[in-house]
């Protein structure tokens, strides 16, 4: 007579549940709570370096504008002071304008006080070659002469082509040249996350 096989409990037979998605999911660098904490940390750093000065946050479309508003809200929460927010269209200042299909112009909206003699903090989602920031600096010059210009980015992925460095960085991410860093924000994409897409 064949020996009896051991009983299999329902727990043993059940398929393991998939792990909950979090920042450790392959490819995901930051989840929603991570981005919130990162914005808070950047806001504290900005406060430390702008005490006693008039500071204006100017977002680079698209997601840089929403990040600027988030930073402004946290700065007000931590300091009790208002940090005006503007939006800067850089379309006509890009150095690849002739290589790209025609695109519609965006809007530039600056705070009532403008940027003259203010500390302007440019805000963007990803810092890569530096060309977008260079275009933003050129565009900003046509709207006044700030006392100082700083740069805040959620992600710095390296591979600079111009001598540009961020003053405030949420996360430094080593990447290959062909990789892609995708930032999603709830205001635009319905979810907050940063994903690293590796080149095939």
Image (cartoon, helix red, strand yellow):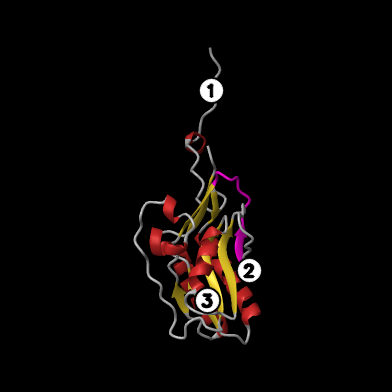
Can residue 185 be seen here? The reply is: yes
Secondary structure beneath dot 2 equals loop
Nearer to us in this view, 56 or 107: 107
* CB atoms of marks 3 and 1 within 8 Å: no
| Foreground pick, 136 / 76 | 136
173 falls in the magenta region: yes
Secondary structure under tag 1 reads loop
Q: Position of residue 169 (x, y in %)?
A: 61, 64
Q: Looking at the picture, does residue 110 appear above or below residue 17?
A: below
Furthest residue toward front: 98
Q: Nearer the viewer, residue 120 or 184?
A: 120
**Neighbour tally class for label 2: few under 14, some 14-19, many 20 plus, Cα within 10 Å:** some
Measured in 3D between alpha carbons, the distance from the residue under mark 3 to the one under mark 1, in whole angstroms, is 63 Å
Q: Residues within 10 Å of mark 3 (few under 14, many from 20)?
A: some
Task: Provide the residue span drawn in magenta.
Answer: 167-179
How would you classify the magenta stretch by its main secondary structure? loop
Mark toward the start of the polypeptide (3 vs 1):
1
On the image, the x and y values in percent for residue 61 come to 44, 65
In the depicted structure, whether residue 113 falls above or below residue 42? below
The residue that label 3 is drawn on is 74
The residue beneath circle 2 is 167
What residue sits right under mark 1 in the picture? 5
Residue at x 54% of width, y 14% of height? 2
């Amino acid at each position: 007579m064949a020996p009896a096989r051991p009983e299999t409990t329902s727990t043993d037979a059940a398929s393991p549940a998939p792990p909950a998605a979090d920042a450790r999911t392959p490819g995901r660098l930051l989840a929603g709570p991570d981005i919130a904490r990162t914005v808070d940390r950047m806001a504290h750093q900005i406060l430390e370096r702008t005490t006693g000065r008039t500071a204006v946050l100017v977002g680079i479309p698209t997601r840089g504008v929403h990040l600027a508003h988030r930073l402004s809200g946290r700065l007000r929460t931590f300091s009790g002071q208002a940090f005006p927010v503007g939006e800067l269209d850089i379309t006509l200042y890009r150095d690849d304008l002739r290589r790209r299909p025609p695109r519609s112009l965006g809007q530039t909206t600056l705070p009532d006080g403008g940027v003259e003699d203010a500390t302007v903090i440019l805000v963007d989602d990803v810092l890569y070659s530096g060309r977008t920031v260079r275009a933003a600096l050129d565009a900003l010059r046509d709207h006044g002469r700030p006392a100082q210009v700083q740069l805040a980015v959620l992600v710095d992925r390296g591979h600079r082509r111009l001598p540009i460095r961020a003053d405030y960085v949420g996360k430094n991410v080593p990447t290959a040249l062909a990789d892609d860093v995708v930032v999603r924000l709830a205001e635009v994409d319905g979810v907050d996350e940063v994903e690293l897409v590796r080149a095939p």
